[in-house]
Image: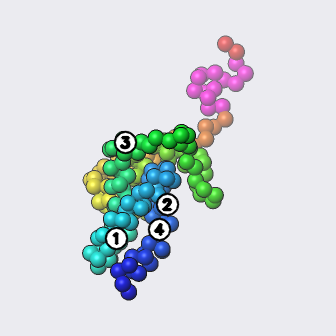
């Protein structure tokens, strides 16, 4: 198989997964498409070397994470003049996670969201996540712990009467 055929076969089989990963990282379908396109452009250039190594998905995943981190460090790169303001609420498509989960995930700081996506959506180990993010395993563990605690707080329904108990008022009591 030629380089172009081999690369084309990889892209045809993995592009939906790469887009989904990028979308989970950044929360914007347009930016996710840009991240995937940038990663695939870089992958094509490095294809002869990367395809021999064998772990292409890990290489591309790292490019997606790095691209997202670069964008978060350079906010002016994302600014575009438009006639209409952009839609700020990017929600999952049909059959995707619930709006409640998606909003809770988007409320996390970018670093915690990246860790949750890599660890719990993609199922990477602590070591693989640390390697992809370029941080220590302790950072991955602490970010995961903080992110899961925040998600639990945001997604756990408040028991009936909890707000009254929090204020010290019992139901039916008058002050």
Q: Residue at x 43, y 46 (%)?
A: 147
User: What's the CA distance linking mark 1 and mark 4?
Assistant: 13 Å
Q: Is 83 on the left or on the right of 125, as rendered?
A: right
Which residue is rendered at x = 45% and y = 64% of the image?
18
- Decide which of 56, 131 is in the foreground and name it: 56
Instruction: Give the magenta range.
Output: 161-173
Q: Nearer the viewer, mark 1 or mark 2?
A: 1
Q: CA distance from mark 3 to mark 2?
A: 22 Å
Mark 3 lies on residue: 75
Left or right side of 158 for 135: left
Determine whether label 1 and label 3 are within 8 Å by CB: no
Q: Earlier in the sequence, mark 3 or mark 4?
A: 4
Q: Residue 110 appears at what percent x and percent y?
A: 40, 45
Q: Secondary structure at mark 4?
A: helix
Say which mark, if any, is on residue 44: 1
| Circle nearer the N terminus (2, 4) | 4
Alpha-carbon distance for marks 1 and 2?
Answer: 20 Å
- Asked if residue 149 shows in the view, the reply is no
Sequence-first disc among 3 and 2:
2
Tell me the element at label 2. Answer: helix
């Amino acid at each position: 198989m030629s380089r172009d055929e081999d690369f084309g076969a990889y892209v045809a089989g993995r592009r939906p997964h790469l887009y989904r990963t990028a979308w989970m990282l950044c929360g914007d379908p347009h930016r996710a498409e840009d991240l995937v396109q940038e990663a695939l452009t870089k992958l094509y250039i490095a294809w002869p070397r990367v395809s021999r190594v064998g772990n292409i998905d890990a290489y591309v995943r790292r490019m997606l994470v790095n691209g997202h981190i670069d964008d978060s460090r350079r906010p002016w790169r994302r600014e575009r003049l438009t006639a209409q303001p952009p839609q700020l609420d990017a929600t999952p498509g049909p059959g995707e996670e619930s709006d409640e989960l998606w909003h809770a995930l988007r409320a996390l700081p970018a670093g915690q969201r990246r860790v949750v996506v890599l660890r719990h959506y993609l199922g990477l180990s602590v070591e693989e996540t640390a390697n992809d993010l370029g941080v220590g395993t302790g950072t991955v563990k602490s970010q995961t712990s903080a992110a899961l605690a925040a998600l639990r707080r945001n997604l756990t329904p408040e028991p009936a009467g909890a707000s009254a108990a929090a204020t010290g008022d019992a139901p039916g009591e008058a002050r």
